[in-house]
Image (cartoon, rainbow, N blue to C red):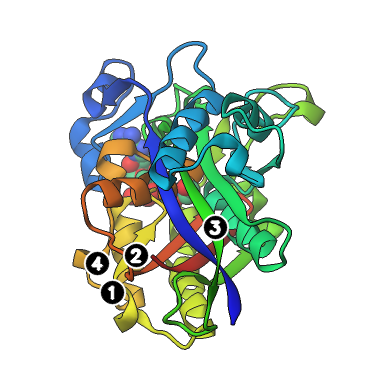
Amino acid sequence: MMRRAVVKGVGHYLPERVVPNAEFEKTLDTSDAWIKARTGIERRHFAAAGETTSDLATHAAKAALAMAGMDGNDIDAIVLATSTADLTFPSAATMVQHNIGNTSGYAFDVQAVCAGFVYALSNANALIMSGQADRVLVIGAETFSRIMDWTDRSTCVLFGDGAGALILEAENGNGDAADRGILSTNLNSDGRYKDLLYVDGGVSTQNTGMLRMEGKEVFRHAVEKLAKTADTALEKVGLGPDDVSWVVPHQANIRIIQATARKLGVEMERVVVTVQDHGNTSAASIPLALSSAITDGKIKQGDLVVTEAIGGGLAWGAVVIRW
Ligand code: UT7
């Protein structure tokens, strides 16, 4: 017998305002055609003035709780992945904790930029495997619209705001790859690549800063590292690409998603794609895609799902889940 972290509910939330590519044509030397062709993005959502990351996260968390048939106090731990928390402290996770009426558990943020959700999932799995928690609410939530340089066409057209949440609960499995739940995780980071993707400010440097990216270089690292981390996570449990029902990748660029799928040996029919509607929502992109795929009836109980993501750090990783 082996403890497993099994998915019991998912939910997501997108801010009301939808911004189509054409809107950027008014202020920048860009076009809907360029953005669509080079990234696959057609629109994204932006949070309203005063709408914060913990607000988006709370909506997603409530939707996941409803699907799981749980209420706030059923949760032992809340792990929230974000790089755009409401305040320097306390964590956005404690704000969500309050909003869902949880007073019995504990909550904290995880910061691994676009890889944040796979980091949060992996750490939530460790909490369950070690017996420190039975039920964990895992959230990815971002308001990247707050850290855009609106004069930089190479970055500001790429990102969007949103949140997704997932609830894990401890169950006993047999300890083999047929078990439901998280079967394996693989996390990596390499701080030598800091200058490829970063925000040029922060608390310790006394300004909020804006996102800076060497897009071409990040692209190159992404395809190679994502395929490898997904392969490694599958190998850990004796599985391969043919066993995969769905790849749910970080949604940064359709060309990265396609090239990674090709390298991994999974055809696009088995890849969940939401980048056209959400843009890159950083740590929110995977739970948003997972929740959309559930809503669309794609992912079903028993399916083998592989998530993979890379972002600033560089930090990257993959999680293999039997749904
Ligand atoms: O989530 C974290 C991970 N991040 C990523 O995965 C992002 C990875 N990178 C990318 O997705 C792509 O590199 C970009 C979408 C950022 C850029 O696409 P690209 O095909 O690598 O284009 P590029 O940077 O090579 O730029 C090609 C041309 C340049 O013009 P010149 O130098 O050839 O005259 C850019 O200035 O496209 C120009 N360009 C634009 N043109 C119109 C850059 N941005 C735009 C734009 N509209 N918005």
| Residue 170 shows in this picture | yes
Q: On residue 169, which mark appears?
A: 3
Pointers 2 and 4 in contact (C-beta within 8 Å): yes
Pointers 2 and 1 in contact (C-beta within 8 Å): yes
Name the side, left or right, on which 106 lies relative to 23.
Answer: right
Amino acid type indicated by mark 2: Val
The residue sitting at the bottom extreme is 238
User: Circle 2 sits on which residue?
Assistant: 247
Of the residues under marks 2 and 1, which one precedes in the sequence? 2
Q: Residue at x 56, y 56 (%)?
A: 121
Question: For ligand 1, which image quadrant applies?
Answer: top left
Q: On residue 266, which mark appears?
A: 1
Instruction: Give how far apart the Cα atoms at labels 3 and 1 are.
Output: 29 Å
Above or below, 34 against 156 in this view is below
Of the residues under marks 3 and 1, which one precedes in the sequence? 3
Q: Nearer the viewer, residue 156 or 48?
A: 48
Instruction: Give how far apart the Cα atoms at labels 4 and 1 are.
Output: 7 Å
| Residue 189 shows in this picture | no
Pointers 4 and 1 in contact (C-beta within 8 Å): yes
Pointers 3 and 1 in contact (C-beta within 8 Å): no
